[in-house]
Amino acid sequence: MFESLSERLERSFKILKGEGRITEINVAETLKDVRKALLDADVNYKTAKTFTDTVKEKALGENVLTSIKPSQLMIKIVHDELAQLMGGSSVDINLKGSPAVILMAGLQGSGKTTFSAKLANLLKTKRGKNPLLVAGDVYRPAAIEQLKVLGEQLKIPLYSEEDNKNPVSIAEAAVKFAKLHGYDVVIVDTAGRLAVDETMMNEIAAIKKAIQPQEILFVVDAMTGQDAVNTAKEFNDRLNFDGVVLTKLDGDTRGGAALSIRSVVDKPIKFVGTGEKMDALDVFHPERMADRILGMGDIVSLVEKAQEQYNEEEARKLQKKIAKNQFDFNDFLSQISQIKKMGNIKDLASMIPGMGKALKDVDIDDSAFTGIEAIIFSMTPEERENPKLLNGSRKIRIAKGSGRSIVEVNRLLKQFDQVGKMMHMATVGQKLKMGKRK
């Protein structure tokens, strides 16, 4: 995500490195490169020009402090303007109403159906809501089946009328059903087309009029670039939607849609899809996205993801075991499981400042822990609890059982031992510090 743009912007800022001060000449040269980088990332031409004009005006109006180099000042101005370009701050969805009705809109293949399920899951698990999914795509039986399967997987009910081909009456009946059965959020999936057409627009406008949704979300595939922005404008002209959802932002996207869409339709990006899993959905934070585009990482989001998997009671038990030097392979497996639940490993690592560039050509996927888990699962319960039991013959048995080499088994045991010692020393050191403070 944004890798190409990040690299291009970094090269642009190098023009100012070594310069003693900001001048109209070196700023113009830098921003010419920045504008080209934005256009290559498929950012709307008018948006790119307005952006660089604003940055130039602010850069030339700034007095550079002695402690700040021109390149650093330019990065700060570009960062602030990037965040502003994408909306400035995050905007939440409107869940007022009894029930709150959310209507999905977008082209076929944009990811509306999957996003509907992801949003229902997020509202259920993180907001404590009781959502109802509604299958309003009457033209594509696969969409109804897909929503049904996802709903069952997430234990979220689905309202559908498979013999009814009128999406307006289905949506109206679903809202009545939700009121009768105590559902506080209704998420209506609708039909998409391969291109914008009058029939499609009339139909979704009729659904909007019938159910009066509190929130209309336009779902768009981030990989379609400027086409996504143009489609968003057409939908907004007819529906006046409340927010945008960018799906497939984890793919090979140049970022043009994310950077252009707010300025073109003047509607906030509210969510971004970052993977295929049902929990791979994030609230959109413009400032954090600007951090990532400029290679600054996104520590806040990383910490939030970690906190979602954090169990205070389990953490206390683990700390006690580490303090007594009793950290074992069962604890290690538990930690791996928590990391995997946080999301794609490479995406998580890229949130650490500087790591995105370092990992650019490194292939890290969700199978990164497979070999380690295979080795640990090939141990007996006693061996997992007491790694000191692992002698030569046991290691050979584990290697055969896991399909890994004896070298890999020995490497894991050595690394596990080192990690255990480091955690023990850190825990003991922390206790000593706390004792001194008292």
Image: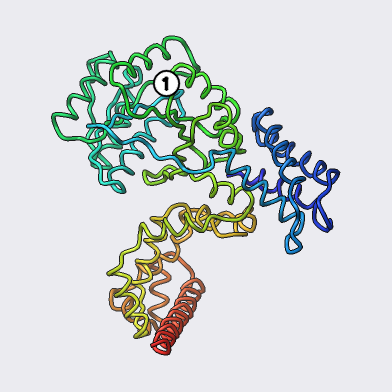
Residue under the image location 55 percent in, 32 percent down: 262
The C terminus sits in image quarter? bottom left
Which of these two is toward me, 165 or 398?
165
Residue 113 horizontal/vertical position (percent): 37, 31
Crowd class of label 1 (few under 14; some 14 to 19; many from 20; radius 10 Å):
many
Q: Quadrant of residue 170?
A: top left
222 lies above or below 341: above
Which of these two is toward me, 292 or 267?
267
Residue 250 horizontal/vertical position (percent): 52, 43
Q: Examine the rendering and report whether any part of residue 392 can be seen.
A: no
Q: Label 1: state its secondary structure.
A: loop
Q: Which residue is mark 1?
A: 192
Q: Residue furthest right?
A: 25
**Amino acid of disc 1:** Gly
Which of these two is toward me, 431 or 134?
431
Which of these two is toward me, 338 or 76?
76
Q: Examine the rendering and report whether any part of residue 359 can be seen.
A: yes
User: Is 77 left, or right, of 365 in this rendering?
Assistant: right
User: Is 37 left, or right, of 236 in this rendering?
Assistant: right
The N terminus sits in image quarter? top right
Residue under the image location 76 percent in, 59 percent down: 69
166 lies above or below 224: above
Residue under the image location 28 percent in, 78 percent down: 382
Say how the picture is coloured: rainbow
